[in-house]
Every structure is written in structure tokens, then in C-alpha cells.
Image (cartoon, rainbow, N blue to C red):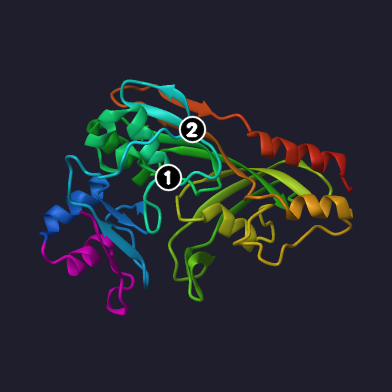
Amino acid sequence: MSTTKKVSKDLINLRLDKATSVLFEEFSRTKLKEWILSGNILLNGEIASPREKVSLDDEIEVNPVNEISTEWCPENIDFSVLHEANDFLIVDKPINLVIHPGAGISSGTLANGLLFKFPKLEELPRAGIVHRLDKDTSGLLVVAKNEKFRLYFIDLLQSRRVKKNYRALVIGTLRGNLEIDIPIGRDKNNRTKMTCREDGKEAITHVKSIDSYGGYSLLDVEIETGRTHQIRTHLAHKKLPIIGDKTYNTRKIIAKDTPDELKDFIRSFPRQALHAHKIGFKLPDSEDCVVFESKIPKDFKELITTLEKFNIS
């Protein structure tokens, strides 16, 4: 069984491995560091390196079980497998699908669906899932099919050797390229939200403009780091909130001179217009690199078509 504890004031800015050794004294430091490296210890639900600095109220989850690591039940869940190799799967996640069971959610997740389609994934922690997307973010995820690849891909993530590109439709106009290098941490007033703050964790986002529709833009977003809500937080901070993002565009900002019909369409868009479009990495025991791309989903295409129709430039 996994155990989760929160970082207290006396542990702020300690490395993850040191903070974990204080919070979980029942385990040796060597074992805890080994679990961090193997992805059996998560920081705010994400895989992190032992050197990662922790912040107040960060959640550290320890799951020491390496064998049959989950009691999640197989369910026939609708999702697509874009590619299947001997060592891994490339899943194309639809919107409105949670990655795995958690607080208040015991079923109906991608993990349940993976266990239904690929029963042997029960032998791996988190059914082979090694990174995640928000419920309403669509697109590509890598799922390990064996422990060797799981550990390999975790190492790639921790050393920032996985290339991840997203498509985002935002309110506002970007001219050229933008690099956002601003730390991210928990919002002190809303624990379910992230914010840009000096004492947060390093977060680097690269943004390129693909197209513009008057006061709206289609962006290519590449992330070097993988912080919770990183793209949504960074873009909102730069006054480029993602269309449909109810968490980071709470005032429902709309571009100037937007026609009423378009205002209604944008404000009723049911999810953040963010899609994990491309993922690339080097294969193990090889010099070959692979890149996978996901088609833009139907609702995202319809939003682009509507913005083109009402282009207010």
C-alpha cells in the first residue's frame, strides 16, 4: 500500500531524498533513494529526481511494492493505442479521462483500461504509466510494458531527454517565439492550483506561434521540465490563458472586439484547449530515436475552424 505525507515547514528546500528520509524513517535512506530513482516515490504525483527541492505542503507518495503493485480493477475503457512495441505502448488519451485511480476516483481511468487490454501490466507499478496528462488534456502518453523499459524511461524523464510538444489555443497574440523560465509552486490560497513564484521549482517552457486569429493564437509548446500544470500556469502568467481553462482563466478573459457569437462559443468550450501532440525519445540499447504524433482531436479542430470563421483581425 502506498503512503502519502506532506512536507512541513522544517523541510522546505531540502532535496527530495533528504526530505523523504525524514518523513519515512521506517525505511533506509539507500532504499528510499532507490525508490525515487525507480519511480516508486512521487512528488505531487510526478516522477522526480533525488535532487529535486521540496516546498511547503508538497505531497510525497511512497509505494514500496514492486511486484503486484495495484489493486485497480480491469475495465473496458475507450482509448486508442497509437503504437505498440515489445517494450512500450504509445497511448492517445481522449479528453475527460483520468490517468489512474486516486482521491475520490476508484474506477473509470486509463489505468483500469490498460489492465483490461494488457493484463500483464498488473505486474508493474501504476500499470506501467510513467508520466501523466490532466483529465481534460488530450494526446500522447508512454506506457512501459516491462520493468527494464519503465526504469529506462524514468531515467530519460529525470534527465530531461524526452521531447514533448503540445498544441494550445490561447486568448492573446504572440509574435515569434517565447521562452518562459519561471519557477512554479503551489498557490498559497488554492491548493489545487499552481502559480509562478520565486520559491517554486524550476520550470522551462518554449513557445512558438503557429497561427493567429485576430486576438487568439495557435501555439506549439515544448516543455523542458514536467511540472504540474506547467503549460497552463506559464501561459496564463504571460497573459496568454488557454481557451476553456476554468482554473487559470477564472475571469473568462476574451479578446477585444470578439463578436458575441464567438464569445459564447469560446466561453462554452468544455475543456482547456491543450493537446499533447508529439513525443520523442531514444530507444534503449540503440542509437535510434523515435517520434510519435497525435492528430488534433475533433473538438480542437472545430474550435480552430470557428476562430478562422470569426477572425477579428
**Relative to 47, residue 73 above or below:** above
**Relative to 94, residue 25 above or below:** below
Which labelled disc corresponds to residue 179? none
Compare residues 121 and 172 and report the one nearer the observer. 121
Image x and y of residue 255, in percent: 81, 57
Query: Left or right of 289: which side holds 29?
Result: left
Query: Who comes first in sequence, dot 2 or dot 1?
Result: 2
Q: Residue sitting at 24 percent across and 45 percent down?
A: 38
Name the residue at the bottom extreme: 9
Magenta span of residues: 1-26
Query: Left or right of 220: which side holds 255?
Result: right
Q: Amino acid at mark 1?
A: Ile
Q: Quadrant of residue 274?
A: top right
**Relative to 296, residue 65 above or below:** below
Which labelled disc corresponds to residue 99? 1
**Is residue 16 one of those drawn in magenta?**
yes
Q: Amino acid at mark 2?
A: Asp
Compare residues 120 and 19 and report the one nearer the observer. 120
Residue at the spot of label 2: 78
